[in-house]
Image (tube, rainbow, N blue to C red):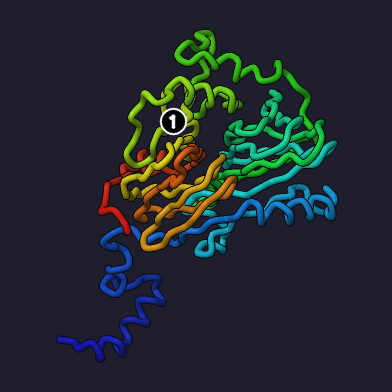
Amino acid sequence: MTTSTEAETDPAYAAIEDLGAAPLWRYYGNLFPAEPRSAAVPYVWRYHALRPHLLHFAETLSLEEAERRVLMLINPGMSDPPATVNSLYAGIQVILPGETAQAHRHAANAFRFVIEGDGAYTTVDGERLHMRPGDLLLTPGWHWHDHYHEGDGPMIWLDALDYPLVNALEAGFFELFECRSQRPVVPDNISSRQFVHGHLVPAWDIARSEVSPIGNYPWAQTERAFDAIAEDAEGSQVDGIVLEYTNPWTGGPVMPTMSCRVQRLPPGFRGAAFRRTASSVLHVVRGSGTILIDDERYDWHDRDVIAVPGWAICELRNPSATEDAILFSFSNEPVLRALGLYREELTERQG
C-alpha cells in the first residue's frame, strides 16, 4: 500500500496533471460540502452615506465620461467579478434633469426600483414607463431600453440585474440601439394599465411568456394592496405581511431568474429565525429595524440596502412601537426552484 508521503512524491500525480486529469480523492470534500457555503457575506450599504458621493459624480462627470452614473454595491466577498450576492447585482443610479441614457439591450434581465425623484421615464421596447418613488420597472433580457429625465432634481433608483448568472453561464450578449433614444410606438404605461385589474387580463394577448408583460408595477397599487389587507392578514411568521410581484400569465415570479417581493413589518414585529438556499437583496423603503444574520446584528434605516447570503440564518425585527417598516427585496429563488435546489427551514431563534 502507498503511504501518504509516497503519494505526494508519486510521479503519477504530475503525469495525470499534464494529461488534464486530477485525483478526485484530493477534492472530494470541497466538491460535496455538507451544506452551502456562500462566497457572499452579510453587508449593509448606507444610502444616506452613499448619496452625496453619487450626486458628486453626477455633477462632476459628463455623460461622455460616465454614461451610467452608478455606484455598484459590491459584496466584500464577491469583488471579482463584482456582484452583490450570488448570481445577483445591485447598484444605485442617478440621472439629472435633461439627461438621457443611450438605448441598448443585453441578455441579462434587469429591473429598477425607484428611490427618489419625479419626472423621468424609461422606454422599454417603445413603451414609455413613467417613474415615481416605489415603482418597480422591468427591463427583461434583450428588450431595448433607455431613460430620459424631463423633471426637476435628481432621479435615483436601485438597479438590479442577473448578469453574474448570465456571465457565469457564458450566455451574455450586449448591443447598442441605432439611435440614442427610442421613439414611443405604444401609449405610455399601456402595459401597466392593461394588467392593473388583477385577475382580469387581456384575452387578446397570446404572446405569453415566463417574463411578466407589465412594464411598471406602480407604488400606488402596492399601497392599495397593503391597505386592503390592513390588519386582517396574519402574514408570515418569518416575513410579516409579504406580497410578491407576479407575472399575470403564470402567477409566478416577474422574471425567470429573479423574484421581487415587498413586505410590511408591523410595529414590534419579531420574526422567526429562518434560512433559505436563495440569496437575496433587501432595500428599505421606509422605517428602521434590525436583521440578525448568523451571529451578527445589523441595523437598517430608510433606503439602506442589505445583502443576505444564501443559507445564512436570518431574523427580521421592527422595534418601533408605532411605525411599520416596509422592505422591498429580490432574490434568485426562481433559479433554485427551477433546478430543484430550493430549500428553506425555520431554525433556532437567535440571541
What secondary structure is found at the residue carrying circle 1?
A: strand
Residue at position x 56%, y 63% in the image: 79
Could you tell whether 6 is left or right of 227 in the image? left
Q: Which class describes the residues within 10 Å of circle 1: few (<14), some (14-19), or many (20+)?
A: some
Residue 138 percent coordinates (x, y)? 59, 32
Could you tell whether 111 is left or right of 175 in the image? left
Give above or below for 319 relative to 294: above
Residue 168 percent coordinates (x, y)? 50, 53
Residue 306 percent coordinates (x, y)? 51, 52
* Residue type, numbered disc 1: Leu
Q: In which quadrant will I find the C terminus?
A: bottom left
**What residue is pinned by disc 1?**
243
In the picture as drawn, the residue positioned furthest to the left comes out as 1
Residue at position x 41%, y 24% in the image: 251
Give above or below for 154 relative to 124: below
Residue at position x 54%, y 44% in the image: 284
Q: In which quadrant will I find the N terminus?
A: bottom left
Residue at position x 58%, y 28% in the image: 219
Of residues 59 and 248, the one nearer the viewer is: 59
Q: Is residue 287 visible?
A: yes
In the picture as drawn, the residue positioned furthest to the front comes out as 321
Residue 300 percent coordinates (x, y)? 52, 51
Of residues 149 and 303, the one nearer the viewer is: 303
User: Which image quadrant for residue 34?
Assistant: bottom left
Question: How many dots with numbers?
Answer: 1
Could you tell whether 12 is left or right of 200 in the image? left
